[in-house]
Structures are given as structure tokens and as C-alpha cells.
Amino acid sequence: MTKLLSHLVIAISVYLDLVNALPEPALHKGRRSTITKSTSPTVILDSGVIIGTTTTVPSATASVYQFLGVPFAVSPPKSFAPPEKVKPWSQPINTTTRSPACMEQFMGDAETVNITKTLFAYPDAIESEDCLYLNVFVPATATADKAVMNWIFPGNLYFGDASRPQYDGSSFAANHDIIVVAGNYRTNAFGFSNSPEIPITGRNAGFYDQRLILDWIQRNIAAFGGSPSRVLIFGESSGASSVDRLVTTNNAPFRAAIAQSGSASVSAYPDYYSTSWPTLANITNCSTATSQLSCVRSAGAFTIKSIIETNYLIFGPENDNITQLATPTLYRRSAHLSAQVPYLIGTNGGEGYPFMIGFDNLTTAIHYDLYNPSDSQVSAIQVAYPVTTYFDNTTNVYDVVSQLFTDIYFTCPTGLIARSTATANSNLNSSTATTTTGSIYRYFFNQSYPNLQLLLPTPLNLDLHSYHTIEASLIFGTFPLLNTTTPEIQMSAFLQKTWADFAKSPENGPGWIQVQPDQGADNEVKDIGEFTVVFGDDDDDGEGKGKGKGKPGIVLRKERDLDGRCNLFDEQYESVVYPAF
């Protein structure tokens, strides 16, 4: 397996050419809603008229307008190149059908691919390079100045699809009077080719797709009744690391951000894909071509997909200092190249369980998880993460290696980002004698539900606890209705309201105090779970194994409870400046 999915398997002239792919710093104001309200609502965009459809959400009184497959860029784009703004159209177009996914990359044996698709993707997705479209979910009551949430999907920058049913924003729109936008962006070789023929400032095409979506929102969201000055970005996994990359920019076209289980500012593993493009060029018989880029393009999308999957060729972002910063943690600490926006960041208690299926040795897992660990580091980790052998000769090794992975790639980076951001913001405030809106909040989600565990297509009968991405369908309100419990419904409502309220009034925070730069290990993290005692913890052991028997709520937890072993991984965190995903 290769990292992180592999963990599931594991200048100026150029810049000006890319300006159209970047969001405009100034927020667009003054446009009014152009929605014609009916069962087939229409909206006038800056590029033309679109026709949507109407739907309802169970238990909600408000209807929702859906606009599915709205073009935001020229599609299909030129392979591997940054996107271009969509060209105007003269006749109304129907936006009632979800668009194809961009070309995806799945690696491993059949079971691994099946697990990956079930947990993190859409097994039946149609793939195409003609994929640069977005979906908009609008409350039918929308008139003007609604808050907007822009979702960035997960997939380790290898795969993913904005039209996955779990990311349907209708519940947000119907229950919280909020607009949700979710758009496709290119991943793997198609989004991050690293071709030397493309200037370095243009190689991260997938990130430019994300930025063009934000630019589209600025130019068009008022036509749906949304406010371009009330945009929140949120994402999960690589969607969260994309949020983290966007937060480390100035003049951001959003006013708040949420990162769920992912970051780009801290990494335990460097990039490892410098040879992928030459290998792809060689396999496509393009090594000696006058233009390898043109030659590889001519091979065709599905041929390229087959090659990169079969040969385990990993592609990822380059540090271009536009869409991805070198040594991003240092930049964040300086605070002068970061968006000063309220930031909610958090993780799940059992993130590592799906990634460590099949691991039965702690030492093997340590070398797998960490880049070039020293012998003394391995020994220290073995002491800090002891494996217990029980009377029946079974061990807790799967729980231990899963917790180790959770800490290395999720819990500890989140703590570092929270504290460094709080410190940077405090230093900036001190130097400028102003009050910043760049507050940061941290959460820890620690629940699981049986009907969500059933999504795992494995004969191993493993309990994945509060695994990576488990919270997404709860936040969107799209969790399976079969065998749903009342606490699960309550938890979904609690999470969705927390996220929606943060989007509407980020200056008020999510309902708990922000991370303080001078508190260190005494900082309070909100542990979100279900408890039989208010502010109690008798249904949860703190390791992602809460079963959800009580009522939803939050408890206070000290950072030291979550981050107590994180110093074991500083060797990697301090040396890696080219994050792998």
C-alpha cells in the first residue's frame, strides 16, 4: 500500500496566464437573486441561464432547489492544465443531472478497492475528463444574503466525486436556510501531473479547479440568494488538507473554514512521486517524443488511468508557493500569509482503523507510518503504545496500530496546527494592536453507529469504531435510514446545526472557546459524543469506541489527553516540508 490512499492500499508571465483560474480578492457585491421560483426553477448566471429541479427533505417543511451539473469551467479541460472559466451559452441548459466524476485512481487488490470505494468514494460513479461541474442546493425561501457552504470532497487527491449521495446538501438547505455548493476537482495525474513541460506554477491543476469554484461562487452565488461575503469552506480528509492550503493564503474569498480530519501544514511523510511522470511517459512510449506532454495526452484518459492504477504511480501537488506553500507550518506561525478567518479543525477518535486492516505487528506499522524512523524512536513508540496479549492468546495489536496511525496522521497534526495558529494570531494581534477574526477551535468526534459500520464490505467482521469519514454523512444528514437509532438522528442534527451556525455566524464560534496560545496542554478540546450523563464520559473510552447509547452533546477534554504522545513524532513533523497528500 502507498500513502495515504497507499495507506489504504499506500514566473511572472506564467502567473499572469493563470490569473483567470484564481479567485478575485475583492468580494463581489450588489447582485440580486435571479431565481424564478417554480418546480423547475431558473437562475441567470454571468454565463447563461440554468434550469434546476425541486426536492423535499423528510421532516423539513421547506423545499429545496437543486441545480446539478452546473458548468464552472471549460469542460473537458485540457489534460493536466489549469482550468479556464466557462464560456457563455445562449440557450438555457438543464442542470438536473449530476455530472460524471473526474478520472479516479484506485489501487490494490479487489477487496482493497472495494473497501476504498465504499468508505471514501462512489462505487457506481461514471468517470470522465468532462467533469468540471458543480452542484448547488438552495432553500426555496432564499431571497438574499444567505450564508454559503462550499464543500471540498475527500479522496487523498487520488479519487473523489462531489456528486456522491453522501454529499447532498439538501438537508442543510431545508433545515438551516443555507446554500451548499459542491464541485468537482481533478485528482491524481490529471490534477497533479508534475510534467516538467508545465511551469511549476501551473502543475497543481486540481487546486486551481478548487479556486475557480470559489471564484464562480463570488461571481454567481448572489443570483441564488446567497451572499459572496458569507462563504465558508469545509472539507474532509484531502478536502480538509485543501482547506488548510486555502487558509494559508491572503485575501481569501471566504470568511470561515472547517477542516475535518486532514491538514497540509504538518506531515509525517514527504512526497514520493518524483519518478511518476517519467514512468508514465515511458509506459506510454512518450519518453523520446518531442513533447512528452502532448504525447501522453494523446494516449487517452482511460489508458492513463489503467497505467497509473496498474503500476501504482502516485501523483500529488508541488510546492508552487501559490496553491501550496513550502514549509507551510513556518508560514502559518508567521501569520502574515494566512487568512485571518475563524477556523474549526478536528478529528475522529478511530481514524486509523480502515487504514490498518491486515496489520498484525507494531514494529512493521511504525516503519510503515513514519518516514525513516530511528531505532531509538521505534523503541520509544513501542513503549508508549504497548501491545497486550490476552489469556486466549489474542492481542490488541489492531487497536494499537490503528491508534498509532490516528495519532501520527490526524490527532497530533491537528493539535500542532491549532496551537501554532493560535500563537501566530496572538503575535499578529500584539504587533498590530488590533483584534483579529482568526480564531481557531478544535473538536474531537468519538462516536460510531452499527448501521454505518455495515458499510464496510469485508469478511473480517471488524469494528472500525469512529473511523475516518464516519462523520461526513451525519453532518450532511445523509446517513443510511436502515436501522437508524434515535441517538444517531439526534447526533446528526446536532452536528449539522453546529456546522450551519458556524457558517452563519463564525464570529460567535461553534459553541465553545477558542484555542488559547498560552494554555498549551491545558487547552480544552470539545469531545463530541453521546453520553448518558450530561458532560459525562461514561459511554466512551477516548479511543474512538463510543457506541452511541446516550444523547448527543459535548464534554471538555484537555489537549494533553489527546496529544500526550505526539512529541514522539516531532522528528518527522519538523523535517517534512513537502507534504505527500
Image (tube, rainbow, N blue to C red):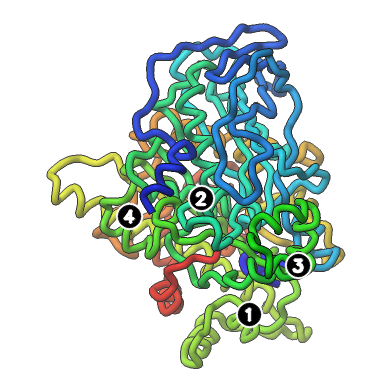
Residue neighbourhood size for the residue with mark 2, other residues' Cα within 10 Å, grouped as few (<14), some (14–19), many (≥20): many
Select label 3 or label 1 by which is in front.
Answer: 3
Residue reaching furthest to the front: 290
Q: Earlier in the sequence, mark 4 or mark 2?
A: 2
Residue at numbered disc 2: 242
Residue neighbourhood size for the residue with mark 4, other residues' Cα within 10 Å, grouped as few (<14), some (14–19), many (≥20): many
Q: Residue at x 43, y 14 (%)?
A: 31
Q: Earlier in the sequence, mark 3 or mark 1?
A: 3
Would residue 532 be visible to someone looking at this image?
no
**For the residues bearing labels 1 and 2, Cβ distance under 8 angstroms:** no
Residue neighbourhood size for the residue with mark 1, other residues' Cα within 10 Å, grouped as few (<14), some (14–19), many (≥20): some
Select label 3 or label 4 by which is in front.
Answer: 3
Would residue 352 be visible to someone looking at this image?
yes
**For the residues bearing labels 3 and 1, Cβ distance under 8 angstroms:** no
Relative to 59, 417 lies left or right: left
Q: Residue at x 43, y 25 (%)?
A: 228
Residue at numbered disc 4: 421
Residue at numbered disc 1: 365
Q: Alpha-carbon distance for marks 1 and 2? A: 27 Å
Q: Which amino acid, mark 2?
A: Ser
Label 4 element class: helix
Q: Alpha-carbon distance for marks 4 and 2? A: 17 Å
Q: Nearer the viewer, residue 421 or 82?
A: 82
Q: Nearer the viewer, residue 512 or 104?
A: 104
Q: Which mark is residue 285?
A: 3
Q: Position of residue 540 (x, y in %)?
A: 58, 58
Q: Which amino acid, mark 3?
A: Asn
